Amino acid sequence: MSEHTPGIPGYTYGTDEAARSPLSLEDLERLKAVAGLTPEDEEALHEAAGILAGQAGDMVTAWRARLGELPFMRAYSGHPDGTPNPEYGAASKPRFDRFIIDACTRPLDRDWLNYQHEIGLRHTRAKKNRTDHADSLDHIPMRYLLAFTAVVITTAREYLAATGATAERVDRMHAAFTKSVMLHVTVWTRAYTGAAGW
Amino acid sequence: MSEHTPGIPGYTYGTDEAARSPLSLEDLERLKAVAGLTPEDEEALHEAAGILAGQAGDMVTAWRARLGELPFMRAYSGHPDGTPNPEYGAASKPRFDRFIIDACTRPLDRDWLNYQHEIGLRHTRAKKNRTDHADSLDHIPMRYLLAFTAVVITTAREYLAATGATAERVDRMHAAFTKSVMLHVTVWTRAYTGAAGW
């Protein structure tokens, strides 16, 4: 368990244990601008956080179930032969759950950049499996990370609507969540490509 | 003007002039599965095509206006110093318009794979500017391609709702469109990364 964040082992947000992002705050401002993420979106994300907080665990469980239906995806979260690794899944799940809330609430600052780079690295050969001492395949292909973003975005809508917000507010929160997720995933890809062309 | 597709210069879909994708149809099936794109989504996309067909030109105009507000983005579509290049914009626009309809209607087959790879290459040093003999910066950073996908996805909703479809149908079409766009953009990134890690 991290000494910095009791309760979530390996969650090094805001600590020196997280990687240092190669991006500047100006890089981040430009990405926010291209993604269209506005102060109004950040307000809508805070509203979304209140709705999603109690559902984040269920969301991650549902997403993982979707991936678990695909035999070719199993070795990235299970053992190398595709058999389940419940210990790895249990160890990483609180961080994945927390990502949903962080994506709605964390200020977009240096700590954010650093931890997103850490998450990116943990999808690649640089750092995958290390945090949880797992033996899964040591690299999630970038194409699957990007393609699965469609599931994260589209399924989020029903969770945002679950507490009876008006359709207009659900639209607003869903658009903001979509922008936030795309911003996160975009920054994660930096760990895959290096600086050239990214 | 291409001899194959009168009316849209440089639109080489389904011809030998398009690049040959390095991906197999099995690769494509896996990406569809990870993105969650189902036969029901493909039906919803055909419904969406009917609604978007008359609006595609406006959508692209609006998206480009958004990008035009960002000074650091102007040299990718204008001249290298950021001044406008209306000829380049006019030459490439019919293909961008067409992308919206293609994303809703084209069968996901070998021709699709090939033309998506062509589109990917046309965002990078491999082929950017060549089709229209433009002098813009010769590579759109992958991070901006990915981040801008948030704008494409979120703004699509209002266009899908423009003709008065029920909220349930708009939800359905919007989810399908989101999956389709993510699938396209995912495949485009192959031109950026090469095979390693992708």
Image (cartoon, coloured by chain):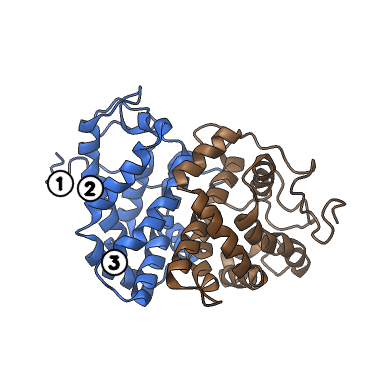
Chain colours: A blue, B brown
| Residue A52 located left or right of residue B51 | left
Q: Chain of mark 1?
A: A
- Residue topped by disc 3: A48
> Mark 1 or 3 closer to N-term?
1
Numbered circle sitting on residue A112: none
- Residue topped by disc 1: A4
Is disc 2 in the same subunit as disc 3?
yes
| Residue A156 located left or right of residue A13 | right
C-beta proximity under 8 Å, tags 2 and 1: yes
Q: Chain of mark 2?
A: A
Q: Disc 1 residue type? A: His
Q: Nearer the viewer, residue A120 or A166?
A: A166
- Residue topped by disc 2: A15
> What is the x, y in percent for residue A92?
24, 40
| Residue B195 located left or right of residue B125 | left
Q: Disc 2 residue type? A: Thr
Label 1's element?
Answer: loop
The residue that appears at 51% across and 44% down in the rendered structure is B32
> Mark 2 or 1 closer to N-term?
1
- Outermost residue, top side: A81
Is disc 2 in the same subunit as disc 1?
yes
Q: Disc 3 residue type? A: Ala
Label 3's element?
Answer: helix
Q: Chain of mark 3?
A: A
Q: Nearer the viewer, residue B58 or A15?
A: B58
* Distance of label 2 from label 3 (alpha carbons): 26 Å
